[in-house]
Amino acid sequence: MDILCILIGLLFMLVGIAGSILPVIPGTPLSWLGLVVLYLAPSLEFDWTFIIITGIVGIGIYIMDTFLWVEQYRP
């Protein structure tokens, strides 16, 4: 179970990094989801405050990214 959580978390992180290059993939939420999956792995120690703070920062970045993308393509 532990190795499965680590592999799934790594996969989400890599897809999130690819999402920072490809505009179709939402990179920030996928990277944060990878952190949440890594938080569920029993052998890795994460604090729940770290997950909450990175979630708030991730939501802010996602909102700003969406707003800037809409402003860029507004006629």
Image: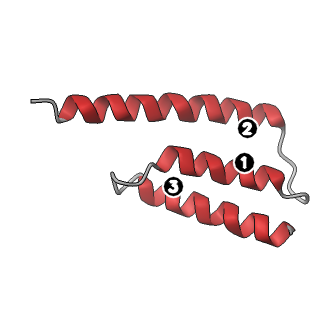
- Tag 2 residue: 51
Q: Amino acid at mark 2?
A: Ile
Alpha carbon distance from label 3 to label 1: 13 Å
Give the position of the N terminus as an image quadrant: bottom right
Mark 3–mark 2 Cα distance, whole angstroms, equals 16 Å
**What amino acid is found at the position of numbered circle 3 in the picture?**
Gly
Single out the residue that lies furthest toward the right. 42
- Please identify the quarter of the rendering in which residue 73 is found: top left
The mark that comes first in sequence, 3 or 2, is 3
As measured in the structure, the alpha-carbon distance from the residue carrying label 2 to the one carrying label 1 is 7 Å
Question: Where the C terminus falls, by quadrant?
Answer: top left
Badge 3 marks a residue whose secondary structure is: helix
Q: Earlier in the sequence, mark 2 or mark 1?
A: 1
Residue wearing tag 3 = 16
Mark 2 crowd level (few <14, some 14–19, many ≥20, 10 Å Cα):
some
Residue that appears at 44% across and 48% down? 26
